[in-house]
Amino acid sequence: MSHNTFGHLFRVTTWGESHGPALGCVVDGCPPGIRFTLKDIQDELDKRKPGQSRFVTQRREPDEVKVLSGVVTDDDGETLISTGTPISMLIENVDQRSKDYGEIARQYRPGHADYAYDVKYGLRDHRGGGRSSARETAARVAAGAIARKIVPGLVVRGALVSMGTRSIDRANWNWDFIGSAENPFFTPDPASVQVFADYLDGIRKAGSSVGAVIEIVAEGVPAGLGAPIYAKLDQDIASNLMSINAVKGVEIGNGFEAARITGEENADEMRMGNDGTPLFLSNNAGGILGGISTGQDVIARFAVKPTSSILTPRKSIDKDGKDVDVMTKGRHDPCVGIRAVPIGEAMVACAIADHYLRHRGQTGRI
Ligand SMILES: Cc1cc2nc3c(=O)[nH]c(=O)nc-3n(C[C@H](O)[C@H](O)[C@H](O)COP(=O)(O)O)c2cc1C
């Protein structure tokens, strides 16, 4: 299976399967002198790791990262400094239960990658979904933690804004609430926790699943990243987000809403600010015009479909072409959108870091 690499100058290659001994990534192109700690990476991985509430898969993976290459340790014994050589990171799989996937070796889960994967490769590691499992995304989150350090002042944050038919009240938006212990959903609206909890408990107990929409906001993106045609910043952000498992839609700025409003409503008007820099009076464009960042917040949203592996029997076929009813055993997220929040943040951070380095390469300035 080829195509395991994304990015141009900040280039990430991931490797490993859901039920193999380990997975990881190689980050190639990180400039020398970038400073970060193991904790910076682990904190991001801890946001994504399974088993943290009843609303996510009960697979128990500590997701402890090891940095194998590409860094030296500073005198404080804690800070890692990139040397400019490939940074290789490894995360062990410790809680596989491959026997849960016995039947999936021959049957195709409706909505999952099983059928298409078999048609293409004729051979697949069915245990835990193999390479099409979102376990692979742990490696992207590790890479994203380094990407965040490359652009000075960059802050990339994500929030779950709707789950199935339930949505947050944007008037209650509080970024500080997202990291709180009482918030298993990455919602920015404290009032939505109980609503999501009751809703998802019902879905979970019914052996079903539900989708979600996640919003990513990147602050501190310098103006000028991207290019007008084949290297649009929005194009690469969309591509990175669309590459996440189960993502079926991406919007930049007001996205599909732009098609429903007038030019007067949609255009972000400008004035000169008191400090002599341009001021945008709105941000419908999501911080990107003509493929190039404007210096406003970069805003993207993505839609995640409901988990395909569900306990309710669904009609399908097996490898021999026989009709079967598939009921997926094993441990699964009833709403994979929850754990997709840190993955989305990482993929946007990687796109921005890559464009930052490309901009520097082309213009010699930032
Ligand atoms: C964090 C995360 C966890 C996931 N866990 C599961 C899971 O437990 N069971 C499942 O059927 N799909 C899960 N998925 C989705 C599948 O990986 C995905 O639907 C599958 O690879 C097919 O790809 P596609 O949905 O992009 O077409 C997860 C996705 C994400 C982002």
Image (tube, rainbow, N blue to C red):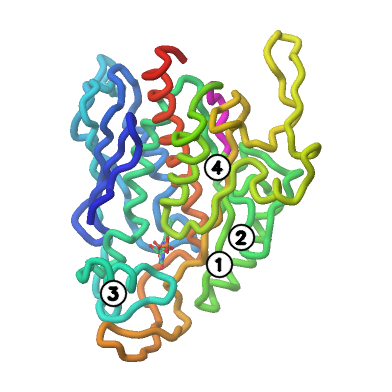
* Callout 3 crowding tier (Cα within 10 Å): few <14, some 14–19, many ≥20: some
The numbered disc on residue 158 is: 4
For residue 164, what is the image quadrant?
Answer: bottom right
Q: Quadrant of ligand 1?
A: bottom left
Image quadrant containing the N terminus: bottom left
Under mark 3, the amino acid is: Tyr
Q: Which residue is mark 2?
A: 163
Under mark 1, the amino acid is: Val
Q: Which residue is mark 1?
A: 210
In space, the residues marked 2 and 1 are separated at their CA atoms by 7 Å
Q: Percent x, y for residue 90?
A: 23, 43
Q: Judge whether 174 appears above or below 322 on screen.
A: above
Under mark 4, the amino acid is: Gly
Q: Which residue is at a point 69% across and 33% down the rendered structure image?
A: 283
Q: Please, what secondary structure does the residue beneath circle 2 have? A: strand
Dot 2 and dot 1 residues touching (CB under 8 Å): yes
Left or right for 142, reference 102: right
Q: Which residue is mark 3?
A: 101
Q: Magenta part of the protein: which range? A: 217-222
Q: Which residue is at a point 43% across and 41% down the rendered structure image?
A: 347
In space, the residues marked 1 and 4 are separated at their CA atoms by 19 Å
Q: Please, what secondary structure does the residue beneath circle 1 have? A: loop
